[in-house]
Structures are given as structure tokens and as C-alpha cells.
Amino acid sequence: MGEFFGSYLFKRYPKRRHIRRVGTWLGFVTKAVVEKIGGNPRLSHSRQLRFDYKGIPFKVFYNHGIKRGVMRGGIAIAEVLPGKGGPQGKWVVEIGSLDEAEDFYLNPKKALNAFLAQNS
């Protein structure tokens, strides 16, 4: 899955550095979802990774609005609400750097459990 998203970014946005820079983070995030969370990971809308955690659907996607210093763009994880088209709910985590991607990989359930505790 990480290879799919990486090749998508580099083919679709070859000259947009703020988008391409997240390519190095995708490995951490997809590996965390697939290997540490599980939850039926699947591709959605060609640009999103969806998964379930404790019966709640979530999605991983690129977001231009994430900003770290002067750099913009990052990976967001949000709850998927019931309804047609799977409307987006609250954000669980935003990843705006390689270090943040690694932190998510090392303990992805920490962010998800904190989100569930605040929103249950």
C-alpha cells in the first residue's frame, strides 16, 4: 500500500515539493496501519487508506492545511462518520514531519485510544 501511495504522489505531482515530501512518511504510516493496527486496511477513493479500529472507521489522507514552520502539507487521520460518501469526522492526528510519522509508527494505538477516550 505504501508503494501505491508513493508512486501516486510522484506520478501525479512531480513538481509539487510540498506534496512529494510526504512520500517518505507514507511507509511509516501505512506500515503502522497494516501491521500494528490491522482493522481491514483498504484503499478508498484512490487517495485514501481506510481502516477500522475498535469498530470505528478511520481514513488516512493528504491535507494541504497541515503546517510546520514554513512547510505545508501533511498526512491526516480522521474518523469517518456514517452517511453517504463517508463524511469526515474529527481529526485523530496530523503528521507534518518525518519525526511525527515515526512517532505514529512506534505507537499508533496511543493516538487512536486518546481520540476515542475524548470522543466517547
Image (cartoon, rainbow, N blue to C red):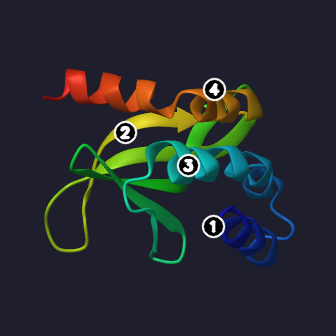
Tell me the element at label 2.
strand
Q: Amino acid at mark 1?
A: Met
Disc 4: which residue: 103
Q: Nearer the viewer, mark 4 or mark 3?
A: 3
Tell me the element at label 3.
helix
Disc ID at residue 1? 1
Q: Is residue 41 visible?
A: yes
Q: Earlier in the sequence, mark 1 or mark 4?
A: 1
Residue 62 placement (x, y as % from top left): 57, 55
Disc 3: which residue: 35
Q: Nearer the viewer, mark 3 or mark 1?
A: 3
Quarter the N terminus occupies: bottom right
Q: Earlier in the sequence, mark 2 or mark 1?
A: 1
Residue 118 placement (x, y as % from top left): 22, 21
The residue located at (56%, 49%) in the rendering is: 35
Mark 3 to mark 1 CA distance (whole Å): 12 Å
The residue located at (85%, 71%) in the rendering is: 14
Tell me the element at label 4.
helix
Q: Is residue 63 visible?
A: no
The residue located at (49%, 62%) in the rendering is: 49
Q: Residues within 10 Å of mark 1 (few under 14, many from 20)?
A: some
Mark 1 to mark 4 CA distance (whole Å): 19 Å
The residue located at (86%, 66%) in the rendering is: 15
Tell me the element at label 1.
loop
